[in-house]
């Protein structure tokens, strides 16, 4: 061996080729990762995202339905609308004005009228005597001692169901509706049950007196007026007055009136429009009516021409019960 041969190292021998089974396995594994595993993972990821989006949408819908106002919530929201509140306040004020005008014109100014402070002030503005107004408030828990109760929202809140079940069961007149409703009620001094019994007895007495009056040859009446007399719909004060007049004078009843708007059917008609035969007799009739005493002192007025004068005879509310029985 020469020196040059000793200085050069031996080149490493080449590794043996891998077995054909290992080559095949590696090829299959790479093909699987490229064509199957990666697309499958991507599909799984996309599917998961889709599911998450669907779930989020469903949650949003449910939350939206829960937060959407229902009918009662919408009504409550509407009731809180300033425009709606303003309209309700204006309507309530209008109903109070209408009721105050009716009470001032139709109710006896000697009667005691129970009302809430605002209604009492409105009645006084319309000319009802302040001395006849009794304020219902927390300090005065009932309307006893009054002849009339003006029912407003404040009075109904104060008295509750006792207002009509105990104190004032019958409606003389009604104005408006809803929370702004104003009703003119008759007070029942002995309680609602006793008042209803007395009212029924009064209807029966009015029916008997009206039918008896129809038999008077000095008294004529239009068809509707005859029906109202026979049905007991005419105030007893008016019946007694007409009977007294027909005893001496010839009268024709053109009609009865003065039922308040929304009045109970049992509330009698307190006014009559009549004609009298001759101007001289009309003067005598007026003189007779003007000397009467309460409760038979009516309000009177004359209208029409000199040849066809019409007399209005009117009594104030409330109508007294049991007048015929009292003589």
Image (cartoon, rainbow, N blue to C red):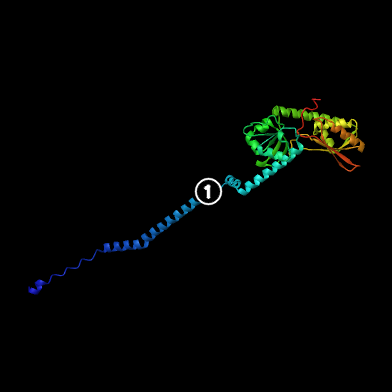
Residue drawn 9% across and 74% down? 4
In the depicted view, which residue is nearer to us: 6 or 198? Answer: 198
Residue drawn 53% across and 48% down? 67
Q: Quadrant of the N terminus?
A: bottom left
Q: Is residue 152 left or right of residue 219?
A: left
Q: Whole-percent x and y of residue 27?
A: 31, 64
Compared to residue 327, the image places residue 317 above or below, namely below
Compared to residue 176, the image places residue 139 above or below, namely above
Which residue appears farthest toward the top when viewing the image? 326
Which image quadrant is residue 299 in?
top right
Q: Quadrant of the C terminus?
A: top right
Q: Is residue 253 left or right of residue 155?
A: right
* Secondary structure found at label 1: helix
Residue drawn 68% across and 43% down? 93
Which image quadrant is residue 194 in?
top right
Compared to residue 148, the image places residue 325 above or below, namely above
In the depicted view, which residue is nearer to us: 24 or 294? Answer: 294
Which image quadrant is residue 186 in?
top right
Reading the image, the residue beneath label 1 is 67
Compared to residue 165, the image places residue 65 above or below, namely below
In the depicted view, which residue is nearer to us: 87 or 121? Answer: 121
Query: Is disc 1 surrounded by few (<14), some (14 to 19) or many (20+) residues within 10 Å?
Result: few
């Amino acid at each position: 061996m020469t020196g040059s041969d000793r200085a050069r190292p031996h080149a490493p021998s080449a590794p043996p080729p891998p077995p054909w089974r290992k080559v095949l396995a590696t090829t299959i594994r790479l093909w699987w990762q490229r064509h199957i595993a990666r697309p499958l993972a991507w599909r799984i990821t996309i599917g998961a995202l889709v599911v998450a989006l669907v779930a989020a949408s469903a949650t949003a819908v449910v939350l939206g339905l829960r937060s959407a106002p229902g009918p009662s919530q919408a009504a409550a929201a509407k009731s809180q609308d300033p425009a709606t509140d303003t309209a309700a306040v204006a309507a309530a004020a209008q109903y109070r004005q209408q009721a105050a005008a009716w009470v001032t014109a139709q109710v006896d100014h000697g009667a005691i009228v129970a009302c809430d402070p605002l209604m009492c002030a409105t009645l006084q503005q319309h000319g009802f005597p302040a001395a006849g107004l009794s304020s219902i408030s927390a300090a005065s828990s009932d309307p006893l001692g009054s002849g009339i109760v003006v029912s407003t929202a404040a009075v109904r809140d104060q008295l509750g169901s006792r207002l009509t079940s105990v104190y004032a069961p019958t409606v003389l007149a009604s104005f408006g509706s809803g929370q702004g409703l104003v009703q003119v009620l008759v007070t029942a001094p002995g309680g609602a049950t006793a008042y209803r019994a007395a009212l029924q007895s009064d209807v029966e007495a009015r029916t008997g007196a009206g039918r008896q009056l129809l038999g008077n040859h000095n008294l004529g009446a239009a068809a509707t007026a005859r029906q109202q007399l026979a049905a007991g719909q005419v105030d007893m004060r008016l019946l007694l007055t007409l009977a007294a007049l027909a005893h001496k004078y010839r009268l024709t009843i053109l009609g009865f009136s003065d039922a308040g708007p929304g009045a109970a059917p049992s509330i009698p008609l307190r006014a009559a429009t009549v004609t009298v035969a001759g101007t001289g007799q009309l003067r005598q009739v007026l003189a007779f009516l003007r000397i009467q005493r309460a409760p038979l002192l009516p309000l009177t007025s004359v209208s029409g021409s000199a040849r066809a004068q019409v007399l209005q005879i009117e009594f104030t509310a409330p109508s007294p019960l049991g007048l015929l029985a009292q003589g």
